[in-house]
Amino acid sequence: MGESQQQHEPLLRSINNVYVSLVRFINKTMRNVVLYWIDYQGRAVSYGVLSPDDCLDIDTFVTHPWIFVDQETKERYTVNQKDVFFPRPSPLLLVRQERRYPIRVALHPRRRRVRIDVFITLPVYSLRELCLRSIRRLLTHDEQAFQLDIPRSLQCELAVMLLKNEALNNPPNL
């Protein structure tokens, strides 16, 4: 793979389908959460909406990232206080590539397949982050952050937050 191709590949994307992970996504928030799998090209693929306290069983793979977004506000939720969830391998299963078709192989066929519970939760923010988020909601453009009578480092941080929020509200592939 050439150097120019590597520069254009998305940083967050699925890589392979070797190690199976059986997960159960559980929404522990009081909001509707949209589940997104990040595919091999780095595009977010919706796997539906989970209502509060609802769950969804998914057969996925270790190198397949997942993100969780509030259906209404588009804010990201966390799993284990991380923005992106990477599944752990299920101890009993793997995938063997034969020609072009993956075949699941149970390493211990007599044992029950157990799913890993994945709890989707609200992120925990520091007081500083909460204050910045509150101010951000009052602003509409990143330039407005530089008009505030606050330290320059906070102005820059607010401007970046506004740009990220704009990108989330107008995503090319969500």
Image: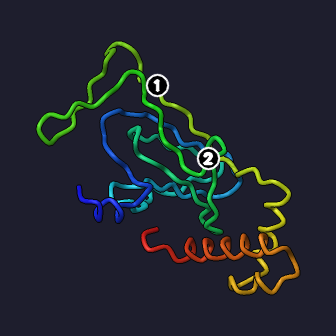
Residue 107 image point, x, y percent: 31, 18
Q: Say which element carries label 2.
A: loop
User: Which picture quadrant has residue 111?
Assistant: top left
Image side of residue 78 versus residue 152, left or right: left
Seen at 63% across and 68% down, the residue is 72
Q: Say which element carries label 1.
A: loop
Disc 2 target residue: 82
What mark, if any, has residue 23 been given in the picture?
A: none
The image quadrant where one finds the N terminus is bottom left
Disc 1 target residue: 114
Seen at 47% across and 33% down, the residue is 88
- Amino acid at the residue labelled 2: Lys
Residue 3 image point, x, y percent: 29, 60
Are there few (<14), some (14-19), or many (20+) residues within 10 Å of tag 2?
some
Are there few (<14), some (14-19), or many (20+) residues within 10 Å of tag 1?
few
The residue mark sitting in front, 1 or 2, is 2
Seen at 56% across and 55% down, the residue is 68
Mark 1 or mark 2: name the one nearer the start of the chain: 2
Q: Nearer the viewer, residue 100 or 153?
A: 153
Colour scheme of this structure image?
rainbow
Seen at 57% across and 38% down, the residue is 118
